[in-house]
Amino acid sequence: MNNLNNKKILLIICGGIAAYKSLETIRLLKKNGVTIKTILTKSGSEFVTPLSITSLSQSKVYQDLFSIENEVEMDHISLSRWADLILIAPATANTISKLANGNSDDLASTVALASNKKIFIAPAMNVRMWDHQSTKLNINKLRTYNYSLIGPEIGDMACGEYGEGKMSEPKEIVNILENHFKNLKVKNKFKAIVTAGPTHEYIDPVRYIANRSSGKQGYEIAKSLQKKGFETTLISGPTNLEINSDINLIKVKTAEEMFQSTLRNLPADVAIFSAAVSDYKVKETSKTKIKKQDEINLQLEKNVDILDYVSNHNSLRPKLVVGFAAESNNLENYANKKLNEKNCDWIVANNISNKLIGFDSDFNEVEIFYKNNKRDKLKYKPKSEISDELVEKIINHLN
Ligand code: CTP
């Protein structure tokens, strides 16, 4: 099945010797049934001509930001909305920098900034430029803006040097785009909510009470759910993690905010409570910073237990409620206790005394406790794989 057939792709060609490869990219995309429009940057036109592009793409090449002819036919905003996807290949260090910083001084950068579509970039540049700290920072920024990177590859460069910076081959680029459309087709009818990360309960503007939690396992679960076609909402306490924009990410700080946000996003078919919610909050948060010489007398009160509340709710309770338990001892007893007392369907428990797993680690080992006294062990592996397996079990259960 060809997932590119009838897709609309806006190809942006920037200036670089690799621009010659864009003709082959166009040929392959056309062969797969793609409708292509092309933007050729000023420096791109030093390497390939509009005529050769039009001959292969059988459509117009857009070059100027302020062209009356283009504005009448299709203005830059419509152009950015027309496409199912934008591909920037080759993407130069200069264009990458413009995109990372939100500049819009030519048609290519303006269209990218105005776009609400998925953007793929295939960088092509000299190895030193690619290795430069500023390029690295720009690329990381773009990743957080949900740009996807294709390549670059390691190899001989046109300038005679050897290293990373070569644009990926058109065949590889087209394969990746094909895969992207294939993955989009996987949709199921289920909605999922995941809570993740710690909560911060403020003592004063600079101090807070929190549980240890990186949020990694929860973020991986959200990714696995989204990959499997769940409409996924991730309600996250403060973390340093990023996630792709197909997941509805709601950032919160306190347990109360996490609670309210969870309620607003119900109903759902499955809710997974992986957050390390602080059990206590400060009764009265000081509006000003408490000074060292001040007497501190913290009065704490209990936070609402989000899992318990949702799990015991008549109308809001999802079909499947999954809680987490991080325990340092007596894992089985505590996990079963939480399973029953919080009325959840499954408890995913891990042993935090095992230094190889949990908290900041990318690895985990968990045991799933079910209502019917059965249990499953997911042996030591990356958190991403633990999540994939957990989500497989969720799908089987919901079906
Ligand atoms: N949980 C929650 N809201 C809270 C506290 C916990 O939703 N205010 C959820 C967690 O996300 C997790 C489960 O409850 O899924 C268990 O959390 P945990 O902190 O291990 O359990 P507690 O009930 O707080 O018990 P204890 O701290 O005594 O182990």
Image (tube, rainbow, N blue to C red):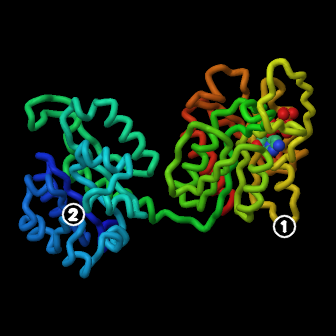
Res 378 quadrant in image: top right
Is 382 rendered above or below residue 20? above
Residue sitting at x 59%, y 28%: 361
Image quadrant assignment for residue 231: bottom right
Front residue (pair 291, 143): 291
Q: Quadrant of ligand 1?
A: top right
Q: Tell me the crowding category of disc 1: few under 14, some 14 to 19, or many 20 or more residues within 10 angstroms, Cα based.
A: few
- Residue at (85%, 46%) from the top-left corner? 305
Helix, strand or loop under label 2? strand
Q: Which mark is residue 33?
A: none
| Residue 265 screen position, x and y as percent | 71, 61
N-terminal of the pair, mark 2 or mark 1, is: 2
Judged by depth in the image, the label closer to the viewer, 2 or 1, is 2
The residue positioned farthest toward the bottom in the image shown: 72
The kind of residue tagged 2 is: Ile
Q: Seen in the image, is 82 located left or right of residue 208?
A: left
Whether residue 163 sits left or right of residue 287 in the image: it is left
The image position of residue 133, as x and y in percent, is: 33, 30
Amino acid type indicated by mark 1? Ser
Residue 373, x across and y down, in percent = 82, 43
Label 2: few (<14), some or many (≥20) within 10 Å?
Answer: many
Q: In this orientation, does residue 44 appear?
A: yes
Q: Is residue 280 visible?
A: no
- Mark 1, secondary structure of its residue: loop
Give the camera-side residue of 375 and 147. Answer: 147
- Quadrant in the picture for the C terminus: bottom right
Q: Which residue is mark 2?
A: 39
Residue designated by label 1: 315
